[in-house]
Amino acid sequence: MLVGIDGSPACERAVEFAIGEASRRGVGLVAISLWTDPHPETRATELTARAHRLLEEGLARYNEDLPDVDVTRLVAHDDPARRLVQESASAQPVVLGSGLARSPRRAASRSSFAERWFR
């Protein structure tokens, strides 16, 4: 089972659902936090640290629920749509949140993600 973690409210619901489903199905969970090319003034190390923090915070409130779920944590610098599609090849199922974008740029990226996902 695969779930992406980005720190949004929709992500919280997706993580809760994914953990419950992984437990019911007796399968592992891959939790992934991705970041794309940074703003020129932002260091890649800062974005990597933020992605790790988002991943840990996204799973933290469910730590008591995780003993029976084997969780693999992944952090990567990659295009979210491309990487989630790639990782989904071995996942059953993929859990996606559907929150509102916080900026027009994120709205565009989510739209292109949806278009890629359902091709």
Image: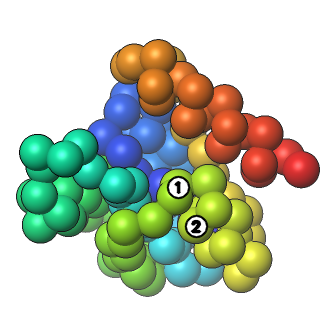
90 left or right, relative to 29: right
Residue type, label 1:
Pro
Tell me the quarter of the picture where residue 112 sits.
top right
Calculate the distance from the C-alpha at mark 2 to the C-alpha at mark 1.
5 Å
Residue type, label 2:
Arg
The one of 42 and 86 positioned closer to us in this rendering: 42
Where's residue 94, x and y in %?
67, 59
Secondary structure at badge 1 equals helix
Where's residue 115, x and y in %?
78, 39
Secondary structure at badge 2 equals helix
Residue appearing at x 36%, y 45% in the figure: 6
Residue appearing at x 38%, y 55% in the figure: 36
Q: In this rendering, is residue 73 above or below 94?
A: below
Q: Are marks 2 and 1 in contact (CB under 8 Å)?
A: yes
Q: How many discs appear?
A: 2
Residue appearing at x 85%, y 46% in the figure: 118
38 left or right, relative to 115: left
7 left or right, relative to 84: left
- At label 1, counting other C-alpha atoms closer than 10 Å, the crowd grade (few under 14, some 14-19, many 20 or more) is some
Identify the disc placed on residue 83: 2
Where's residue 79, x and y in %?
51, 58
Q: Which residue is mark 1?
A: 80
Which residue sits furthest right? 119
